Image (cartoon, rainbow, N blue to C red):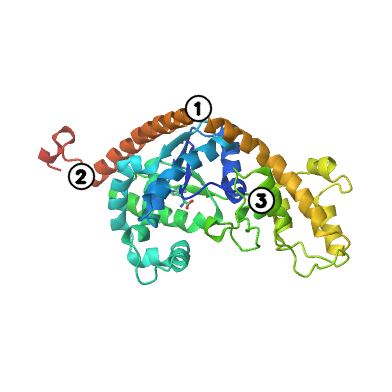
Amino acid sequence: MKQIILTGDRPTGKLHVGHYVGSLKRRVQLQNSGKYDEIYIMIADAQALTDNAEHPEKVRQNIMNVALDYLACGIDPDKSTIFIQSMIPELTELTFYYMNLVTVARVQRNPTIKSEIQMRGFEKNIPVGFFCYPISQAADITAFHATTVPVGEDQMPMLEQCTEIVHKFNSVYGETLTEPKIMLPDNKACLRLPGIDGKAKMSKSLGNCIYLSESPENIKKKIMSMYTDPTHIRKEDPGHVEGNPVFIYLDAFCKDEYFSEFLPDYANLDELKAHYTRGGLGDVTVKKFLNNVIQAEIGPIRERREAWEKRLPDVYEILRAGTEKAHETAAKTMSEVRRAMKIDYFDEGNLLKQD
Ligand code: TRP
């Protein structure tokens, strides 16, 4: 069986380091592993509009931002197809038919939808389109017969719902759709990077992100102001590394070789953690080290982004060509679906045939 990846992001802002460790870095590794026959990376503008209906210009603006962030991270348009969701009408068409296979109660039980309804204050006024986005996401995945969906932990309920739709469709209309598998980050710290303020999630609306396109000065300012262990007041005090954002970031980004480069008193992260826990290691030392690590990881990404920013017509062409290719694949799946559902009336005069 062909190994096919589909994944994507909503274009509601520039991508941040949480996106990077949670998903982008992995995508680039998978892309370069040579183990996948096809890789589709979708800019989910239609999904972004499900809770930004009044701000289409914000979504529009961020399509280029997300594309630049992808290219900056090392997504290679010769190996991966980058495309724009709304330009593929088949995705909407599939969604409409899948809606018949899912109950309202089932979507209401989706934990991600539940928490998003709360977060957005939608309790009494849920837009129907927003409510249906898990179904539309199943369309995104199945339209490409994706076998592997590398995403963050928050997308787990979406993948479960997609799998249910696949089973239901195949049992009602015959084997047509491919069951996808979720691929979560293997490093626990990468599952959900906290914000610089220590809040559980790095998010644009909370203003606690470090962006991939951030200037070196801003990165430093943000890291030096990071929330750490509130009980670690004086340098001599014993500190906590568990749940301490500075150490979670180090868990996510640090490699042993950064110690010899930036902090040669320690051989590895375990030694640094042990000293902090014992007491006698100040936050400023750890933050300065973290700053060096993040600058080393993000610097090359920012430089590549700046190079692509000077070639916007090429980025446009990458998106246009990628969308055209993705459209062909989705159209092929759509005809398989129509055939399975026997709504292929005008193919070879089918409506005239008795069966
Ligand atoms: N829901 C994803 C997010 O919020 C974006 C997305 C849309 C997606 N469709 C997808 C991810 C299909 C993986 C597969 O980031």
Q: Which residue is mark 2?
A: 343
Residue at 62% from the left image edge and 37% from the top image edge: 301
Q: Earlier in the sequence, mark 3 or mark 2?
A: 3
The three-letter code of the residue at mark 2 reads: Ile
SS at mark 1? loop
Mark 1 closeness class: few <14, some 14–19, many ≥20 residues within 10 Å: few
| Mark in front: 3 vs 1 | 1
- Residue 83 coordinates in the image, percent (x, y): 42, 37
Give the alpha-carbon distance from disc 3 to disc 2, as whole Å: 45 Å
Confirm whether residue 43 shows in the render. Answer: no
Give the alpha-carbon distance from disc 3 to disc 1, as whole Å: 28 Å
Q: Which residue is mark 3?
A: 187
Q: Is residue 346 depicted above or below 240 in this figure?
A: above
| Mark in front: 3 vs 2 | 3
Q: Which residue is mark 1?
A: 78
* Label 3, ligand 1: CB separation under 8 Å: no
SS at mark 3? loop
Confirm whether residue 152 shows in the render. Answer: yes
- The quadrant in which the C terminus is found is top left
- Residue 72 coordinates in the image, percent (x, y): 57, 36
43 to the left or right of 25: left
- Residue 188 coordinates in the image, percent (x, y): 66, 54
193 to the left or right of 43: right
The three-letter code of the residue at mark 1 reads: Asp
The three-letter code of the residue at mark 3 reads: Asn
Given residues 143 and 250, the one toward you in this image is 250
253 to the left or right of 43: right
